Amino acid sequence: MSLVYFKNISKNYKGNLVLDNVTFEIERGEFVSLVGRSGVGKTTLLKILMHEEKPTKGRVFFEGKDIFKMKPREVTLLRRKLGMIFQDFKLLPTKTASENIAFALEVLGYPEKIIRKEVQELLKLVNLEDKGDLFPYQLSAGEKQRVSLARALIHRPEIILADEPTGNLDPINTWEIIKLLLKINEMGTAIILATHDKEIVNTLNRRVISLEGGKLIRDEKEGKYII
Ligand SMILES: Nc1ncnc2c1ncn2[C@@H]1O[C@H](COP(=O)(O)OP(=O)(O)O)[C@@H](O)[C@H]1O
Ligand SMILES: [Mg+2]
């Protein structure tokens, strides 16, 4: 059974066909780049997997279960298995790096001691051990993205959905994030990297799914960015 299965997914926004009969599967632990020009539907596809947008047609399965037949409680559990990072980080500005990472566990009422330990481990993983007490405005863009990656990992998700995570980063910080995604992938977490950065995709030499005009036009095991 695959981790993610998009089956004949179409999405219409007010008559505008954004995704047109898209089908693909992602296995546990895979690293997949999702590429295509701006406006081609990459974010929409990730939002559908997050259960934030409903497809007009088709079905989406996560670990074999149709996510649009799930009860609200199951959707909550699904979302904990999906970690999301964004181009604009979406950190809470009034909370420190540590508090941003801890927030989801705080809400669930986890004991303070466990939260502290988890946060410390994640800060270490993203090479920010000494920056936990800083607020987002005190962090560089690259550091902010590493905090957001640590936050995305707090529930030990099955998959990280990275939506143009390097869009606001310079080349050095871009590679730092890509290297971290590769490390997290090696630890067993699947990754979907939505990007229009040709150089990243071509250097990764991993599976590439290409979208064009709402259609999946290419799905290659060791793909290149061709569009
Ligand atoms: N909530 C929405 N309402 C109407 N149109 C939308 C909405 N969200 C996205 N779109 C449209 O869907 C298309 C795909 O958008 P998006 O998934 O954000 O593309 P990408 O992430 O590849 O740049 C775009 O034409 C966009 O304008
Ligand atoms: Mg997008």
Image: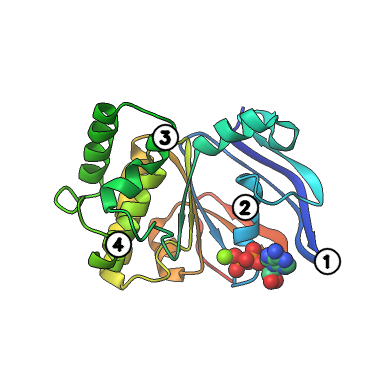
- The reply to whether residue 180 is in sight is yes
* 147 relative position to 157: left or right: left
* 180 relative position to 32: left or right: left
Give, as a three-letter code, the residue at label 3: His
CA distance for labels 3 and 4: 21 Å
**Counting other residues with Cα less than 10 Å from the Cα at mark 4, is it few (<14), some (14-19), or many (20 or more)?**
many
Give, as a three-letter code, the residue at label 4: Pro
| Residue toward you, 108 or 124 | 108
- Mark nearer the N terminus (4 vs 1): 1
In the picture as drawn, the residue positioned furthest to the right comes out as 15
| Residue toward you, 88 or 113 | 113
Which residue appears at 16% of the width and 47% of the height?
Answer: 129
Give, as a three-letter code, the residue at label 1: Lys
> Which element type, helix, strand or loop, lies under badge 1?
loop
- The reply to whether residue 212 is in sight is no
Disc number placed over residue 47 in the picture, else none: 2
Is label 3 in contact with label 4 (beta carbons under 8 Å)? no
Beta carbon of the mark 2 residue lies under 8 A of ligand 1: yes
In the picture as drawn, the residue positioned furthest to the left comes out as 130
Give, as a three-letter code, the residue at label 2: Lys
Occupied quadrant, residue 189: top left
Q: Mark 1 points at which residue?
A: 14
Disc number placed over residue 196 in the picture, else none: none
CA distance for labels 4 and 2: 25 Å
Q: Mark 4 points at which residue?
A: 136
In x, y percent, where is residue 109?
40, 29
**Counting other residues with Cα less than 10 Å from the Cα at mark 1, is it few (<14), some (14-19), or many (20 or more)?**
few
Occupied quadrant, residue 110: top left
In x, y percent, where is residue 212?
68, 67
**Counting other residues with Cα less than 10 Å from the Cα at mark 2, is it few (<14), some (14-19), or many (20 or more)?**
some
Disc number placed over residue 155 in the picture, else none: 3
